[in-house]
Image (tube, grey):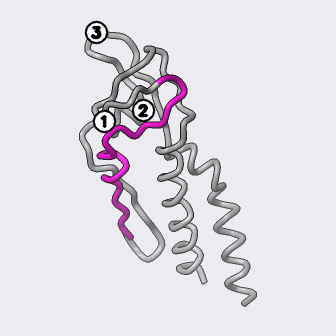
Amino acid sequence: AVREALKKTGKRLDEQFELEVSTVKWPWDRGETVRKNKQIARSPRDIVDLGDLKNSKKSENIDPYGIKWTWEVDYSSIVHDGGKFMDGSPYPERPWTKDAEKEVNIQEYFADILRREIDG
């Protein structure tokens, strides 16, 4: 029952990660940007340009009771956690994983599925 609840919770969280990255909700104080895909992005915006970050998401079952997600592009950390541009100005954080966890409410979601699995 626990493994099935983890599997379903992981799937739901995985879907929410995709949604958070693609949702136009992230503030950007540096004005308009012409992205590499030639689109103009304003604030708020999504965090998808060419899709490399979004498409780099990998999930791995690290043991029977754990899943690990990684985004395998070199800039995923600064996009998620924020930082500084080369001119010293702030680069805003866009913590899509934290927002996804809140939106899914993973503990409650997991517990609900576990109850259903146990009850049959």
- The mark tally for this picture is 3
**In the displayed structure image, the side of residue 35 where residue 10 appears, left or right:** right
Q: Which stretch is magenta?
A: 42-61
Q: Position of residue 53 (x, y in %)?
A: 33, 45
Residue type indicated by callout 1:
Asn
Residue position marked by numbered label 1 in the rendering: 37
Residue position marked by numbered label 3 in the rendering: 87
Q: Position of residue 41 (x, y in %)?
A: 44, 27
Determine which of the numbered discs, if any, sits on residue 57 in the image.
none
Q: Residue 39, relative to residue 115: is it above or below?
A: above
Task: Tell me what residue is drawn at x 50 percent, y 42 percent.
Answer: 96
Q: Residues within 10 Å of mark 1 (few under 14, many from 20)?
A: few
Residue type indicated by callout 2:
Asp
Task: Tell me what residue is drawn at x 72 percent, y 71 percent.
Answer: 112
Q: Secondary structure at mark 1?
A: loop
**Earlier along the polypeptide chain: callout 3 or callout 2?**
2
Tell me if label 1 and label 3 are in contact, CB under 8 Å: no
**In the displayed structure image, the side of residue 65 where residue 4 appears, left or right:** right
**Earlier along the polypeptide chain: callout 1 or callout 2?**
1
Q: Is residue 36 magenta?
A: no
Q: Farthest bottom residue?
A: 120
Task: Tell me what residue is drawn at x 62 percent, y 59 percent.
Answer: 106
Residue position marked by numbered label 2 in the rendering: 81
Residue type indicated by callout 3:
Asp
Q: Position of residue 72 (x, y in %)?
A: 27, 49
State the quadrant of the N terminus: bottom right
| Camera-side residue of 31 and 69 | 31
